Amino acid sequence: RSTLFPYTTLFRSITIINTGKLKACRYAEDGKEQIVYLFTEGDFFGEHGLFNDQVTPYQVETLTDVKLCHLYRSDFQAVLQAHPGIALQIIAALSSRLASLEKIIGNQDLDSRINQLLLEFADKYGRSQAGGIFVRLPLSREGIANYLGIARETLSRKFSQLENDGIIRSIGNKTIQIRNPDALRHNIASA
């Protein structure tokens, strides 16, 4: 069961994830979930209010047990002044987050969006072993579908197609083996 952080009320701090996984999401008027970001150890959220008093435009929900660290604006600014290199690391992390989001959202081809997301999961949550990259999925299949903005049934068909092509193999509900990451990359490049 996830815990909801009404993060819009904590807009004068940045939160760093020490352990665990969270998702940032919005809900449409009809109750449909749209997942905006996935956060794991070392990631942070809440930067909107640190620099320009904006309310964070999403809710944050836990996917696993988490340990978090909150740095309030004055403390955070003092850390940046004492250690300017941290500011560069934050800019790099935000740039990487934006690039990842642009790759998934900007690609109109659904197969490429799925392939890109699988490669991102492999990079972030995978471990290489004989036979491929084993990825413990951070979301359920329905959550992945919500992240991509598609129906769960569509995602299931696409995963089945990738499995039939020998590119991935499902291991239960929460783990996949990416047998051929080069095929995923090739499919993105040729789209």
Image (cartoon, grey):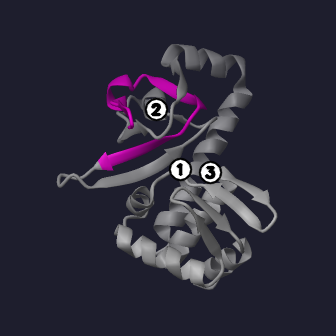
Task: Judge from the rendering whether residue 121 lies leftward or rightward of residue 59; answer left or right.
Answer: right
Residue 183 position by quadrant: bottom right
* Residue ID at (53%, 39%): 21
Residue, disc 1? 138
Distance from label 2 to label 1 (Cα)? 21 Å
Which residue matches tag 2?
Answer: 46
Q: Earlier in the sequence, mark 2 or mark 1?
A: 2
Residue type, numbered disc 2: Gly
| Residue numbers of the magenta segment | 1-26
Q: Amino acid at mark 1?
A: Pro
Front disc: 2 or 1:
1
Q: CA distance from mark 2 to mark 3?
A: 16 Å
Q: Quadrant of the C terminus?
A: bottom right
The answer to which image quadrant residue 76 occupies is: top right
SS state under label 1: loop
Q: Is residue 126 above or below residue 176?
A: above
Q: Please state the horizontal and vertical placement of residue 25, each as a whole percent of the image.
A: 37, 46
In the rendered view, would you say 184 is above or below 129?
A: below
Q: CA distance from mark 1 to mark 3?
A: 19 Å
Q: Amino acid at mark 3?
A: Ser
| Location of mark 3 (residue) | 96
Of residues 38 and 93, the one nearer the viewer is 38
